[in-house]
Image (cartoon, grey):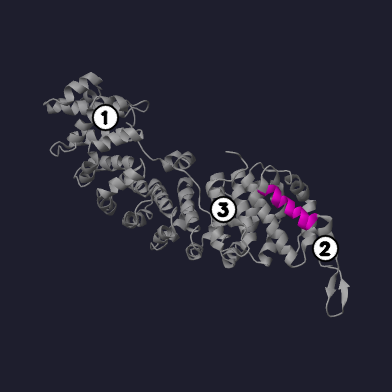
Amino acid sequence: MAENTPTGGHTARFSAYKNKGRDIEDLRRRRVETSVELRKQKKEETLLKRRNVEVSDEEPPSPLQEQNKHVMSMPEIIAGIKGKDSAVVLKCTESVRRLLSREKNPPIERVIEAGLVNTLVTFLDANDKPNLQFEAAWALTNIASGTSEQTQVVVRAGAVPHFVRLLSSPSMSLVEQCVWALGNIAGDGAEMRDMITSHGIIEPLMRLVDMGAPASFLRNVTWTFSNLCRNKNPPPKMKAIQACLPALRALIQHPDREVLADTCWALSYITDGANQQIQEVVDLPGVLPRLVELLGSTDASVVTPALRTIGNIVTGDDCQTQAVLDTGVLQMMPGLLQHSKNSIKKEACWMLSNVTAGSTEQIQAVINHNLLPLLIDVLCTGDFKSQKEATWAVTNLTSGGTTEQISYVVQCGALKPLCDLLVSKDTKLLHVLLDGIINILEAADKVGQTEPVCMMMEEVAGLDKIEQLQNHENVQVYKKAYEIIEKYFSEEGEDKELAPESNEESAQYQFNTNSINPTQGFNF
């Protein structure tokens, strides 16, 4: 697709953007993000499926384990696994599990082609043989960690009802393995997620949270909860979301890093949806303050999903945004806007861009917390992705802010970085930059301060760049650039600006002498 054609969600953003009289909700932006992009961000934080790999090749601590370490060949396994000797059956099942637990190139397809999946599922019914159940569950977990087609094989073999039933087993190692298997199946997509939910997984998972299990156990439980909340097309049913929330409310108070990270990811998936879903999280007692508290964590794997969740909530209505602001979240933003990780800096700018798309009181809160100079610093020195989000934050402010608030944007030095970015090849960014500049010029025009703003733009080479954009291949970009030049920088426009003002009381003309040196800032 051509670079100069805004697509999908961005088209909606641009059509809603030039507000001046539009509802401020039109300025809110939702993250346009596919699961693939999400996975790229940080593997261990966002993994859809996980394989249970044997930890190491250390010496086994007993002769029996040494003997069991031997992995049989596939023909040996096929010959023995359907026999009547229970010891041989267990050994064959363990060998299948070991083959599938290899770090590299596990033979998932060979195991499926050998017809072993149905056999492994029948072993889940062997309640008098918990070791066999455990080995079969582990093997099936690793098959379900494969491709979508491989996951479907496990589901079609009827494993899901067995896994859900075994969540009530007295063997905690077996329970943990079944949780893991169900998490892998839920991670396959919305259809599998809803199918597992319909089998009644949430209630037994809730019991596992309430029983005070160790952190190592809860990590798998929390990750499975996060997969039950994942995927937007379609989103989870509201009933399922509401059933998961009490567990997430409890888990977000846990001290373990991995439990916290996956809990926050689960909340981020829920809030990345309709306002009704956002409200469910807002209404959870203690959750918003805890999310804000986690923004101060030294662990980026916790900060990232906590910030994502808060950012999603402020894409909601003004009341939902205010609920976040009332927790004191803006006090945490300086550290995030200056974070060493660019991805966190970018998320912080994105979050603030949705606050500055709110009411004038919410915009003022951003100003009162001295965040505008930090946003402008990101505009000047941040990585490109952060600069784009900071541009949205500043431009949203100029769209919904008062004249005084827009004046403060200029006083903080926003014009130079906005103009500097006009050389970007990113057409979508150019739209936002030009909108911000137009908004500033319109605000200045209302109070007769156009001339100093135009002088500032000339000083920072903004005029030259806007003139160049009149030749841009994108129609909307060159139209906006042309309108700026025509209205504010053409000879006719300049003559208008220089025309003396009428003083009604004295019936004489007077020049505007209140402008100060543009390089030192000015007041509208």
Query: Which of labels 1 and 2 is toward the front?
Result: 2
Return the residue at label 2. 496
402 left or right of 201?
A: right
Find the residue positioned furthest to the left. 84
Q: Disc 3 and disc 1: Cα gap in Å?
A: 50 Å
> In what element is the residue under mark 3?
helix
Q: Is residue 149 above or below residue 463?
A: above
Between 84 and 231, the one nearer to me in the picture: 231
Q: Assign the N terminus to one quadrant of the image.
A: top right
Q: Is residue 278 above or below residue 59?
A: below
50 left or right of 356?
A: left
Q: Disc 1 and disc 2: Cα gap in Å?
A: 82 Å
Q: Earlier in the sequence, mark 1 or mark 2?
A: 1
Badge 3 density bin: few <14, some 14–19, many ≥20, Cα 10 Å: some
Return the residue at label 1. 97
Residue 486 is covered by the magenta coloring: yes
- In magenta, the rendered stretch is 476-489
| Residue type, mark 1 in image | Arg
Return the residue at label 3. 13
Find the residue positioned furthest to the right. 508
| Residue type, mark 3 in image | Arg
Query: Which of labels 3 and 1 is toward the front?
Result: 3
> In what element is the residue under mark 1?
helix
